[in-house]
């Protein structure tokens, strides 16, 4: 039996494995190879790694885990999970694995507005986070495709960065075309808007069904409800990364730094739980 199984090989899962490994806890990390930022060329706003390729960050993280003998990594897709009073069960490759604790770090997936040409630029010239991608459009025009009140806040955040910020209802944009150094938005009246980049508000959803399968509680945002240490409403089950957030967050925080921090906090809580239960009577 493992002391913890982590599902998800992104920054939250990797950090949880690192923290547990450094405390010599028997941990298995299962990585399906699917990541929310798979199309992103350069990740930003992460101290010491600003501009790093997400794939390189994952590769370096996995290499660091090789130094810890109690950490095992498998590239495998989980087919089912369950929890009971004795721990958790994880089904993978026709095998049932058991652990005392489970960390879900499976992340979110994004459903983009169905505009032809938009998805092809997702993670590059099309983004949703101004902290992660805003600076790359500095001094050039950008567009916000968002009909919600949040567009006003986003516009105010981007105005010191971009030369011009255009807010458009996504329903008005009928196509996105590639330019040599930007994008052309074709509107429903046949007019066009040329910009360096586009910010959209995708509809996020849980990438994996395991939180629902375990009966976890969800926030209104669709993320799993956790306490500040990643504890869910099910004993021994934790969640980390952008798939979960505590009540004091307004929604999922889709940044590498927050994902890494949440993975560490969940691992700390597991180590403390193990230490408490393993005390001599």
Image (cartoon, grey):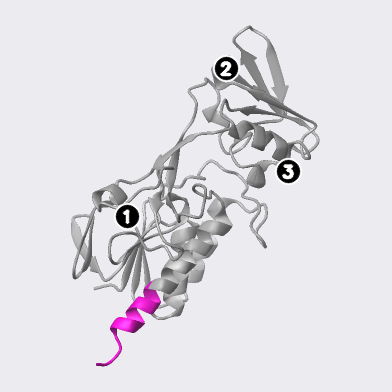
Tag 1's secondary structure? loop
Write the residue at 32% across / 51% down.
217
The stretch of residues the image draws in magenta is 270-281
In this rendering, which labeled residue sits more in front, label 1 or label 3? Answer: 3
Q: Nearer the viewer, residue 249 or 39?
A: 249
Residue 242, image x, y percentages: 47, 51
Q: Main secondary structure of the magenta part?
A: helix
Where, by quadrant of the figure, is residue 130 drawn? top right
Mark 3 burial class by Cα count in 10 Å: few <14, some 14-19, many 20+: some
Horizontal placement of 38 versus 141: left or right?
Answer: left
Assign the C terminus to one quadrant of the image.
bottom left
Between residue 24 and residue 187, name the one nearer to us. 187
Using the image as rendered, state which of residue 219 and residue 4 is in the foreground: 219
Q: Give the percent coordinates (x, y) of residue 83.
A: 22, 61
Element assignment for label 3: helix
Residue marked by disc 1? 76
Q: Label 3: which residue?
A: 135
Crowding at dot 1, Cα within 10 Å, few <14 / some 14-19 / many 20+, comes out as: some
Could you tell me which residue is drawn at 63 percent across and 54 percent down?
A: 52
């Amino acid at each position: 039996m493992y002391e913890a199984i982590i599902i998800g090989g992104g920054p939250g899962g990797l950090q949880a494995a690192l923290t547990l490994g450094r405390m010599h806890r028997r941990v298995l990390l299962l990585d399906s190879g699917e990541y929310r930022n798979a199309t992103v060329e350069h990740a930003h706003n992460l101290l010491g790694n600003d501009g790093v390729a997400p794939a390189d960050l994952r590769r370096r993280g996995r290499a660091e885990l090789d130094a810890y003998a109690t950490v095992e990594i498998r590239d495998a897709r989980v087919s089912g999970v369950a929890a009971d009073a004795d721990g958790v069960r994880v089904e993978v490759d026709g095998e049932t694995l058991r652990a005392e604790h489970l960390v879900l770090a499976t992340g979110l997936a994004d459903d983009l507005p169905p505009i032809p040409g938009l998805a092809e630029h997702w993670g590059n010239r099309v983004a949703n986070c101004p902290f992660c991608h805003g600076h790359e459009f500095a001094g050039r025009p950008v567009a916000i495709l968002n009909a919600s009140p949040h567009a006003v806040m986003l516009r105010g955040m981007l105005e010191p960065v971009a030369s011009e910020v255009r807010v458009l209802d996504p329903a008005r944009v009928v196509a996105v075309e590639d330019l040599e150094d930007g994008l052309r938005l074709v509107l429903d009246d046949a007019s066009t808007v040329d910009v360096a980049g586009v910010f959209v508000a995708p509809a996020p959803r849980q990438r994996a069904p395991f939180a629902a399968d375990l009966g976890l509680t969800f926030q209104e945002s669709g993320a799993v409800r956790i306490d500040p240490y990643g504890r869910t409403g099910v004993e021994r089950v934790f969640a980390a990364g952008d798939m979960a957030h505590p009540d004091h967050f307004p929604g999922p925080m889709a940044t590498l730094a927050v994902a890494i921090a949440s993975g560490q906090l969940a691992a700390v809580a597991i180590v403390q739980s193990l230490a408490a239960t393993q005390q001599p009577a």
